[in-house]
Image: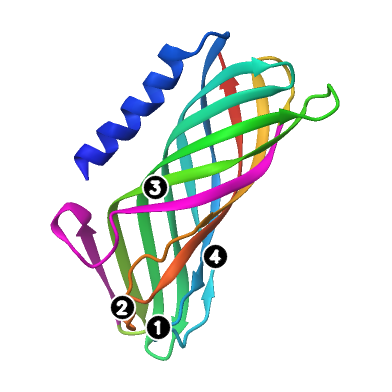
Amino acid sequence: MKKLIVLAIGLFVAGAANAQSPIRLGVKGGLNLSNIVKGDGNNDFKTKVNPGFNAGITLDINLIKGLAFTPELLYSTKGYKAETAFGDFTQTTHFIDVPILATINVGGSGLNLVVGPQVSFLTSTKNKFENGFGSGEETIIEDKSDRFKKSLVGGVIGFRFDVTDKVDLHGRYSLDFQKNNENGSKETPEYKNQVFSVGLGLKF
């Protein structure tokens, strides 16, 4: 896991070092509204949104007029909530996300379309169970567990609105293309993460 994260950071930095066009470093953060798309395993339960957050750094590398390469390195929480016959269950997963995005300006305005692949590295999982008699929590450190895949490939699509040359607002949808595991059960169901997010970005 640590090697994969180091590799992702290396690719992020290399993209900046090799670029011939103006580069702008930025930071961003926002609200995640995460849920899951259930797979074919033992998934007879209903889920709802588990709110979370994302935060990290961004690069804007201008390629040609109206088109930029915009990789990001983000810390992001995902997961879901479920109501079961035995109580309320909440799973919160912690990821390092590396979106590799193209940003396409729309008609010379401040509006931009963003789209591209994303690689996500799972760092830990926190399960919380509550009912009328009490509650319990379990934290799983992924370097020490084989219950879930350590890395997942997905995709991102959304928009960015440049309020000024230094401030932007953004919204996007991301979906994993891979399931979190291949052998689902009620304890570790098969699913794909999906996240709607909104946030604020600052450029330097």
Return the residue nearer the eye: 89 or 18. Answer: 18
Q: Note whether 33 is above or below 83 in the view shown.
A: above
Distance from the alpha carbon under mark 3 to that under mark 2: 20 Å
Distance from the alpha carbon under mark 2 to that under mark 4: 24 Å
Residues marked 2 and 4 touching at CB (< 8 Å): no
Name the secondary structure under disc 2. Answer: loop
Name the secondary structure under disc 3. Answer: strand
Distance from the alpha carbon under mark 4 to that under mark 3: 19 Å
* Amino acid at dot 4: Val
Q: Earlier in the sequence, mark 1 or mark 2?
A: 1
Please give the label number shown on residue 120.
Answer: 3
Name the secondary structure under disc 1. Answer: loop
Q: Is residue 154 rendered to the left or right of residue 120?
A: right
Q: Which residue extends farthest bottom?
A: 85
* Amino acid at dot 1: Gly
Q: Position of residue 200 (x, y in %)?
A: 61, 32
Residue receiving disc 1: 41
Q: Earlier in the sequence, mark 4 or mark 3?
A: 4
Residue receiving disc 4: 49
Residue receiving disc 2: 183
Q: Is residue 200 rendered to the left or right of residue 94?
A: right
Residue drawn at x 36%, y 57% is: 93
Return the residue nearer the eye: 110 or 1. Answer: 1
Residue drawn at x 39%, y 74% is: 190
* Amino acid at dot 3: Ser
Q: Residues within 10 Å of mark 1 (few under 14, many from 20)?
A: some
Residue drawn at x 46%, y 70% is: 81
Q: Note whether 135 is above or below 141 in the view shown.
A: below
Dominant SS in magenta: strand
Let me know if residue 132 is in the magenta part.
Answer: no
Residue drawn at x 40%, y 69% is: 90
